[in-house]
């Protein structure tokens, strides 16, 4: 086995094939047993994707002029990224119509599940919003929300709308 591709799991060498064949529970146990390495791997993968794809000369989302990201960890300790990017010649709320902005957004961002794979369905259920103990028969964030058929631009509410009125809009 090539030492540069050696993978240690439970202090024994594993091939890439053996790693691919681990069960979900085995993978979860390894992630929990070494969260620092997993977080570093996630960060490395994200930085590599950002540098070699998003910011590359390919310009998959146009020419990026600036970006900001934040990595967060959810209850199951799995990391995810919130990212904002600024692109050359992107429409803005002051100069463009909602329709123009939606058309621009729809070129790059989509949301759909077109696969009837059972494992994918289970995975999506794990990613759905859950209620906390403070939940009182109605989610204060207005979830669950139905999927939207099209992109919609929401504008800030008037200062005249009361806090109680804002919750009714959910």
Image (cartoon, rainbow, N blue to C red):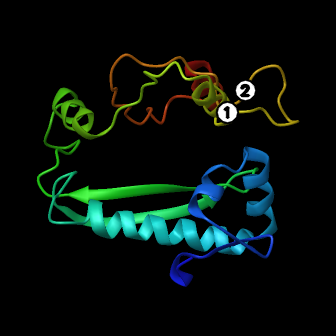
Q: Above or below — where is 11 with respect to 165?
A: below
Q: Position of residue 53 (x, y in %)?
A: 28, 61
Q: Residues within 10 Å of mark 2 (few under 14, many from 20)?
A: some
Classify 10 Å Cα crowding around label 1: few (below 14), some (14-19), many (20 and above): few
Where does label 2 land, which residue? 139
SS label for mark 1: loop
Q: Nearer the viewer, residue 123 or 156?
A: 123
Across and down, in percent, residue 64 comes to 22, 62
Horizontal placement of 50 versus 62: left or right? right
Distance, label 2 to label 1, CA atoms, is: 10 Å
Q: Residue 85 location in percent, x, y?
A: 31, 58
Q: Contact, CB < 8 Å: mark 2 with mark 1?
A: yes
Residue 128 visible in the snapshot:
no
Q: Nearer the viewer, residue 144 or 162?
A: 144
Q: Is residue 115 visible?
A: yes
Quarter of the image where the C terminus is located: top right
Dividing the picture into quadrants, the one containing residue 69 is bottom left
55 versus 81 height, above or below: below
- Please state if 23 lies on the left or on the right of 61 as rendered: right
Q: Position of residue 54 (x, y in %)?
A: 28, 60
Q: Residue at x 67, y 54 (%)?
A: 78
Q: Nearer the viewer, mark 2 or mark 1?
A: 1
Helix, strand or loop status at disc 2:
loop
User: In the image, what residue occupies the spot 33% across and 20% down?
Assistant: 150
Specify the quadrant that holds the N terminus: bottom right
Which quadrant holds residue 30? bottom right
Residue under the point 39% across and 69% down:
48
Residue identified by numbered label 1: 129
Looking at the image, the residue that sits furthest to the bottom is 3
Asked whether 168 or 137 is in front, the reply is 137
Report the residue at 60% width, 76% height from top.
Answer: 6
């Amino acid at each position: 086995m090539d030492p540069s591709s050696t993978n240690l799991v439970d202090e024994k060498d594993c091939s890439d094939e053996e790693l691919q064949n681990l069960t979900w529970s085995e993978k979860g146990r390894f992630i929990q047993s070494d969260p620092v390495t997993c977080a570093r791997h996630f960060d490395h993968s994200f930085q590599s994707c950002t540098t070699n794809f998003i910011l590359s000369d390919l310009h998959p989302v146009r020419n990026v002029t600036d970006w900001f990201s934040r990595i967060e960890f959810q209850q199951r300790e799995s990391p995810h990224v919130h990212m904002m990017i600024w692109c050359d010649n992107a429409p803005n709320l002051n100069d463009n119509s909602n329709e123009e902005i939606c058309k621009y957004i729809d070129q790059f961002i989509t949301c759909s599940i077109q696969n009837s794979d059972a494992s994918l369905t289970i995975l999506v259920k794990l990613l759905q919003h859950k209620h906390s103990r403070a939940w009182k028969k109605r989610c204060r964030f207005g979830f669950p929300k139905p999927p939207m058929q099209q992109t919609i631009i929401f504008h800030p509410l008037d200062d005249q709308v009361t806090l109680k009125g804002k919750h009714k809009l959910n």
